[in-house]
Image: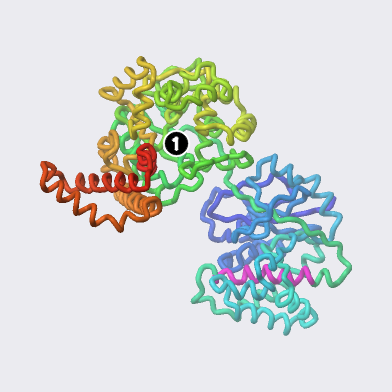
């Protein structure tokens, strides 16, 4: 059988996923710098090698190693996140800098591998039909670039164009028979073959490598890289991409080889799917939250409160689901941990990579849907607590974990605000809950900011495949995103918890109205929890305490914010938010009341005279300012015959 070997260049500092296919041979690029003794992957530092040149030759150190040390009938090269496709399933070609001209795929799961025919049996038959296989070239004209030379000249941060000139001179001197092809490709051709990914028959491969490295080593001897930046230092690797393009054109010109061109795939998520296990062997209390990096500092306040009320007899296993949390925030949150605490970070993007994550408002982000699949992400856990980042603990969260939910899919607290919707605050919600959500009793709708998942039972009923389809089906229709979906999935299978575990704040007048409209028994239980029995306070509605330090129960939140390592960052958020609000108000007034400034001085003088001559003299400056603005609003509104109700609507909006 034909021996086909495609060598996959892997980073030594990153454990990337691999394709289980004997054609692909993973190799550590720059393995001479890998100090991990447990690594079992082949390295490019054995036999005849240039492993130490990784920083300048990039993946070409793997190519050199394969050329000098491996035997095969076909040789190939690709990267841990770039693979040639063997399927007619054409996706959208990317225009992003990091994967220009590639088709992005979510991951290397079995279904993805199947979709693009990256299996041993299929690839073996397909490769044997050709002398060489290359990626489809990128059309530079679509980027308003005329040639490969111009593309490199336009990127001085990445290339010194003089090095391109040196390369062309070397070809002219050493391989004059190929110079015309090289000249046409670099200066006249608008098609570009990038990324050094290919498959070649052995004879072509060895001829190519001799020519290729002969030019690159000569070029290396002529370049002074001592002042080059990190990107410029990779010049040899990037010029190698252009040399491959020249060689492809040379093969085409011979008109005797059977060549194939296929899309190049770019793997967005290459993380290894490793089942996360409980951090502690006994008294392990898993607490999971999902948020983006903008909320990392806010989550630090939750951690501060949870740590303040923690028990030495419990072990706390914090898990953060996030696609973009920064290394700095990871460091800060990790440093908050005590001896009986652990915090780990998982990127869950691959679990919903093919799912429609519809978001219709800029306040929200797609990561909110991850909550629906937490039991599938944490396969080694039977029970987990899920919390929003905008919460604080007022007692040990370990007490919540002891709730018996064996006969339920989850435990959660009745949503008093939603009950207010049902009783008149939003009359349409009752019909929606009954007819679309198909709830047995809409008054048993829960707020999912706090959940205890019976993860084992949940997995038995709902597979990841089902939940992917469920989210795609409902994402564009549900009103409250993942919360509505979870209520649909959990309906009739929920243990209702004491409202103290999700004590919702009265952040604005509408929320306050909803509470007042909720059923009396629910309202009484809420008031008891709010006044004296808070377990977890939830700052769910707007404005948030880090936007406005005077909102309901903000003083309690700021008590823990002050002991958070992100305190200064949170203060910056508060200052920026207030400044932004002031600017928005000004812009709104300028648009809706364009003549207000013309009359301001006259109105201000009149009102000030009235205040000075009355008992309002003792008003504080801020109260006076508010009064002035209010009167100006009503004066201008009267002038333009705007109704009082409309004014109130405008004030609420700003």
Q: Quadrant of residue 206?
A: bottom right
Name the residue located 86 percent from the left edge and 62 percent from the top edge: 258
Query: Residue at 12% across / 48% down in the picture?
Result: 612
Can residue 246 be seen by looking at this rendering? yes
* Magenta residue span: 232-249
- Which quadrant does the C terminus fall into? top left
- Foreground of the two, 248 or 502: 502
- Would you say the magenta stretch is mainly helix, strand or loop? helix
Query: Picture quarter containing residue 523?
Result: top left
Residue 168, given in percent of the width and then of the height, sits at 69, 80
Residue 299 in view in this figure: no
Q: Looking at the picture, does residue 103 appear above or below residue 534? A: below
Q: Position of residue 492 (x, y in %)?
A: 52, 17
Say which residue appears at 60% left-offset and 48% top-offset: 270
Nearer the observer, 211 or 618 = 618
Task: Using a 10 Å C-alpha cutoff, classify the residue at mark 1 as few (fewer than 14 neighbours), some (14 to 19) or many (20 or more).
Answer: many
Query: Looking at the rendering, which quadrant does residue 549 occupy?
Result: top left
Residue under label 1, please give it. 289
Q: Is residue 523 left or right of residue 436?
A: left
In this image, 635 relative to 197: left or right?
A: left
* x, y percent for residue 448: 46, 28
How many tags in the picture? Answer: 1
Q: Secondary structure at mark 1?
A: strand
As drawn, is 591 to the left or to the right of 205? Answer: left
Residue 79 position in % (x across, y down): 65, 56
Which residue appears at 65% of the width and 56% of the height? 94
């Amino acid at each position: 059988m034909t021996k086909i070997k495609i060598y996959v260049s892997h980073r030594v500092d990153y454990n990337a996923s691999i394709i289980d296919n004997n054609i692909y041979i993973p190799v550590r690029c720059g393995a001479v710098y890998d100090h991990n003794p447990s690594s079992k992957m082949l390295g490019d530092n054995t036999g005849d090698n240039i492993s130490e040149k990784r920083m300048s030759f990039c993946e070409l150190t793997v190519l050199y190693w394969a050329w000098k040390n491996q035997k095969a009938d076909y040789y190939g090269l690709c990267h841990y996140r770039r693979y040639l496709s063997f399927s007619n399933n054409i996706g959208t070609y990317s225009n992003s800098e990091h994967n220009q001209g590639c088709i992005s795929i979510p991951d290397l799961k079995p279904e993805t591998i199947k979709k693009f025919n990256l299996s041993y049996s299929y690839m073996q038959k397909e490769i044997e039909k050709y002398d060489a296989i290359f990626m489809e070239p990128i059309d530079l004209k679509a980027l308003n670039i005329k040639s490969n030379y111009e593309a490199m000249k336009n990127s001085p941060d990445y290339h010194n164009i003089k090095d391109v000139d040196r390369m062309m001179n070397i070809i002219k001197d050493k391989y004059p028979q190929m110079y015309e092809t090289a000249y046409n490709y670099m200066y006249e051709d608008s098609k570009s073959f990038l990324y050094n990914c290919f498959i070649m028959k052995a004879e072509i491969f060895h001829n190519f490598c001799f020519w290729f490295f002969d030019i690159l080593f000569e070029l290396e001897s002529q370049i002074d890289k001592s002042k080059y930046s990190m990107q410029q230092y990779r010049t040899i690797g990037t010029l190698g991409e252009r040399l491959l393009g020249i060689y492809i054109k040379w093969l085409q010109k011979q008109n005797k080889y059977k060549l194939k061109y296929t899309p190049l795939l770019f793997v967005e998520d290459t993380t290894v799917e490793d089942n996360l296990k409980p951090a502690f062997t006994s008294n392990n209390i898993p607490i999971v939250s999902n948020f983006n990096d903008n909320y990392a500092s806010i989550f630090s306040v939750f951690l501060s409160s949870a740590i303040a009320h923690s028990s030495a007899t419990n072990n706390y296993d914090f898990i953060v689901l996030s696609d973009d949390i920064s290394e700095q925030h990871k460091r800060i949150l990790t440093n908050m941990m005590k001896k009986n605490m652990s915090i780990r970070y998982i990127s869950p993007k691959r679990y919903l990579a093919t799912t429609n994550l519809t978001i219709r408002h800029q306040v929200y982000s797609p990561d909110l849907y991850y909550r629906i699949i937490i039991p599938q992400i944490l396969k080694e856990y039977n029970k987990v607590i899920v919390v929003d980042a905008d919460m604080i603990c007022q007692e040990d969260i370990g007490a919540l974990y002891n709730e018996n939910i064996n006969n339920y899919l989850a435990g959660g607290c009745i949503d008093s605000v939603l009950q207010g919707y049902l009783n008149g605050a939003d009359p349409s919600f009752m019909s929606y809950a009954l007819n679309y959500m198909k709830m047995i009793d809409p008054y048993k709708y829960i707020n999912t900011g706090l959940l205890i998942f019976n993860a084992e039972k949940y997995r038995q009923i709902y597979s990841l495949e089902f939940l992917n389809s469920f989210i795609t089906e409902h994402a564009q229709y549900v009103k409250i995103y993942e919360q509505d979906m979870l209520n649909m999935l959990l309906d009739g299978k929920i243990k209702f918890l004491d409202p103290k575990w999700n004590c919702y704040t009265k952040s604005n007048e509408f929320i306050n109205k909803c509470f007042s409209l909720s059923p009396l028994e629910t309202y009484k239980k809420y008031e008891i929890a709010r006044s004296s029995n808070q377990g977890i306070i939830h700052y769910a509605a707007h404005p948030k305490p880090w936007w406005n330090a005077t909102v309901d129960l903000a003083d309690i939140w700021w008590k823990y914010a002050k002991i958070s390592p992100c305190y200064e960052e949170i203060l910056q958020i508060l200052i920026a938010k207030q400044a932004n609000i002031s600017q928005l108000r000004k812009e709104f007034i300028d648009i809706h009341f364009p003549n207000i400034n013309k009359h301001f001085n006259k109105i201000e003088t009149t009102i000030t005279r009235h205040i000075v001559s009355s008992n309002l003299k003792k008003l504080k400056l801020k109260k006076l300012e508010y009064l002035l603005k209010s009167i100006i609003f009503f004066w201008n509104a009267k002038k333009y015959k705007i109704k009082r109700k409309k004014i109130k609507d405008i004030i609420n909006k700003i």
